[in-house]
Amino acid sequence: MDGNPVRAVFGETWHRRWVAAVALGAMVSTVTLIAALARPPAAHAVEAPVELGVAESFSVLGGQSVTNTGETVLSGDLGVSPGTSITGFPRA
């Protein structure tokens, strides 16, 4: 023996099994990493820009209502259609 207390207690067979298990774990980890990195990136669809026409001047445009719960500064128009409820904005 080489003075290794683990080998002295468990024997040479235990040490070989432990080394084989560690080597197998390293190989599985390496193959998993290679497989994960080799996958092609997911495709991302790009939508065509939407022409807003007359709605382009609106910074907020709601369908039924628009509610403001804090201090908000709008850089464009505020509108609701077909609804009529606008809450939390001071009158201009």
Image (cartoon, rainbow, N blue to C red):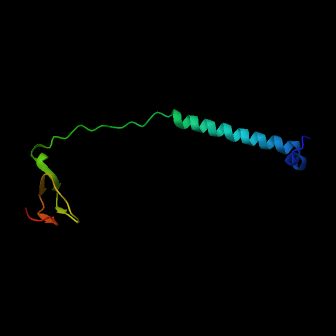
Image position of 22 with respect to 70: above or below:
above
Residue 49 against residue 89 in the figure, above or below: above
Q: In this view, does 80 lie to the left or right of 23?
A: left
Of 56 and 47, nearer the camera is: 56
**Location of residue 87 in the rendering, given as x and y in whole percent from the top left corner:** 16, 66
- Judged left or right of residue 16, residue 89 is left
Residue 79: percent from left, percent from top: 12, 56
The location of residue 3, given as percent across then percent down, is 90, 44
Residue under the point 15% across and 52% down: 75
Of the 4 image quadrants, the one containing the C terminus is: bottom left
What residue lies at 19% left-to-right and 60% top-to-bottom? 72
How many marks do you count on the picture? 0
Q: In x, y percent, where is residue 88?
A: 17, 66
Which quadrant holds residue 20?
top right
Identify which residue is drawn at 65% across, 39% down.
Answer: 28
**Farthest residue in the left direction?**
92
**Picture quadrant where residue 11 is located:** top right
Of residue 49 and residue 76, the one placed in the foreground of this image is 76
Locate residue 61: give its quadrant: bottom left
Q: Point out the image quarter for the N terminus.
A: top right
Residue furthest right in the image: 1
